[in-house]
C-alpha cells in the first residue's frame, strides 16, 4: 500500500562493537556467515566488511543465529559469478547504539541511477550503450539550527569530525525499515531564509546500497 513520508524516523549508529572475524560466507538465498562465538542475537544490525565487493560495507539484520554462525536477512549471495565461492571472508561489526534525529526536514536523495557508457566501434556507424554500474547515493536533510547541544546534533557533528563508519536507519510508520552504511558530512553554517526556520545541513554519503525490510 502507498504511504507518505510523514512520521518517518531517521537514526544514526553512534557506536559500533569491536570487529568479529568472518571465516566463511555461504552462497545462498540468505547468506550464512561463520564467525566463532560471535555473540549476536536475532534482530541485531551489522555492517559487513567482506572480501566480496558487493557485500563489503553492506548493512543487514540477523535473521537466525547459532553459537558460531548467523544468517543475514535478505542478503542473497547465491550467484557464484557475483560472489566467488570462498571469497567472502572478512569481519563484521554490530551497531551498539542508535541516536534518533529529531527536528529534521527537507529530506532528499540523489544518485543510485544506472551509469552508462556510449561506445562506437570504428567499423560501425552506430553507437551502443554499455551498462557501467550505478551512481553513488547521497542523502541530504536540514536540521533546526537551535538543536545545537542536543544528542542528535552532537552525534552528527562527531560522526562528521571523525569520518567514522555509521549506519543510517529509516523507520516508516508502517514498520518498514531501510539501512544504509554511510559517512556523515555535517555543515554547521546556518541557512537564514526569511519566513523559514533557521537550519543547518547534514549529508549522508552512502558506502553501499540500501537494505530494505518490509513491515
Image: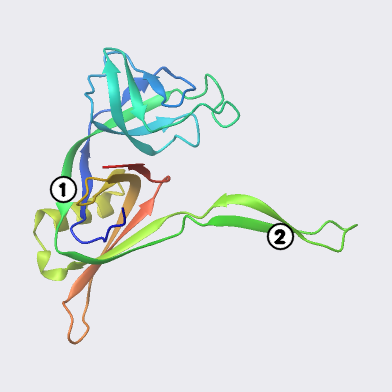
Q: Which residue is mark 1?
A: 99
Q: Is residue 188 visible?
A: no
**Would residue 130 be found to the left or right of residue 23 on screen?**
right
- 10 Å crowding of disc 2: few (<14), some (14-19), many (20+): few
In the rendering, at what x and y percent does residue 213 appear? 32, 41
Q: Give the quarter of the image for residue 110.
A: bottom left
In the rendering, at what x and y percent does residue 189 appear? 23, 72
Closer to us: mark 1 or mark 2? 2
Say which quadrant the C terminus sits in: top left
- Mark 1 vs mark 2, CA separation in Å: 44 Å
Q: Is residue 64 visible?
A: yes
**Would residue 151 be found to the left or right of residue 111 on screen?**
left
**Would residue 203 be found to the left or right of residue 82 on screen?**
left
- 10 Å crowding of disc 1: few (<14), some (14-19), many (20+): some
In the rendering, at what x and y percent does residue 106 appear? 27, 68
Q: Is residue 29 above or below residue 13?
A: above
Front residue of 199 and 27: 27
Q: Give the quarter of the image for residue 205.
A: bottom left
Q: Which mark is residue 64?
A: none
Disc 1, SS: strand
Q: Which residue is mark 2?
A: 118
Q: Give the quarter of the image for residue 68.
A: top left
At 22% across and 83% down in the image, what residue appears? 193
At 34% across and 46% down in the image, what residue appears? 180
In the rendering, at what x and y percent does residue 49 appear? 40, 32
At 49% across and 37% down in the image, what residue appears? 54
**Would residue 160 be found to the left or right of residue 22 on screen?**
left
Amino acid at each position: 500500500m502507498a504511504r507518505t513520508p510523514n512520521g518517518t524516523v531517521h537514526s544514526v549508529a553512534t557506536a559500533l562493537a569491536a570487529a568479529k572475524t568472518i571465516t566463511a560466507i555461504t552462497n545462498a538465498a540468505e547468506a550464512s556467515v561463520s564467525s566463532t562465538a560471535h555473540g549476536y542475537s536475532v534482530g541485531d544490525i551489522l555492517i559487513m566488511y567482506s572480501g566480496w565487493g558487493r557485500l563489503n560495507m553492506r548493512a543487514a539484520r540477523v535473521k537466525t543465529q547459532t553459537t558460531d554462525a548467523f544468517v543475514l536477512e535478505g542478503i542473497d549471495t547465491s550467484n557464484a559469478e557475483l560472489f566467488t565461492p570462498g571469497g567472502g571472508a572478512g569481519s563484521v561489526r554490530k551497531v551498539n547504539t542508535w541516536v534518533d534525529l529529531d527536528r529534521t526536514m527537507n529530506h532528499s536523495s540523489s544518485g543510485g541511477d544506472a551509469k552508462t557508457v556510449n561506445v562506437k566501434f570504428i567499423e560501425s556507424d552506430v553507437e551502443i550503450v554499455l551498462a557501467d554500474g550505478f551512481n553513488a547515493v547521497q542523502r541530504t536533510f536540514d536540521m533546526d539550527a537551535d538543536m545545537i547541544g542536543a544528542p542528535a546534533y552532537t552525534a552528527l557533528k562527531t560522526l562528521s569530525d571523525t569520518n567514522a563508519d555509521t549506519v543510517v536507519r529509516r523507520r516508516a510508520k508502517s514498520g518498514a525499515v531501510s539501512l544504509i552504511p554511510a559517512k556523515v558530512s555535517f555543515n554547521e553554517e546556518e541557512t537564514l531564509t526569511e519566513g523559514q526556520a533557521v537550519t543547518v545541513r547534514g549529508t549522508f554519503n552512502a558506502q553501499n546500497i540500501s537494505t530494505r525490510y518490509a513491515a
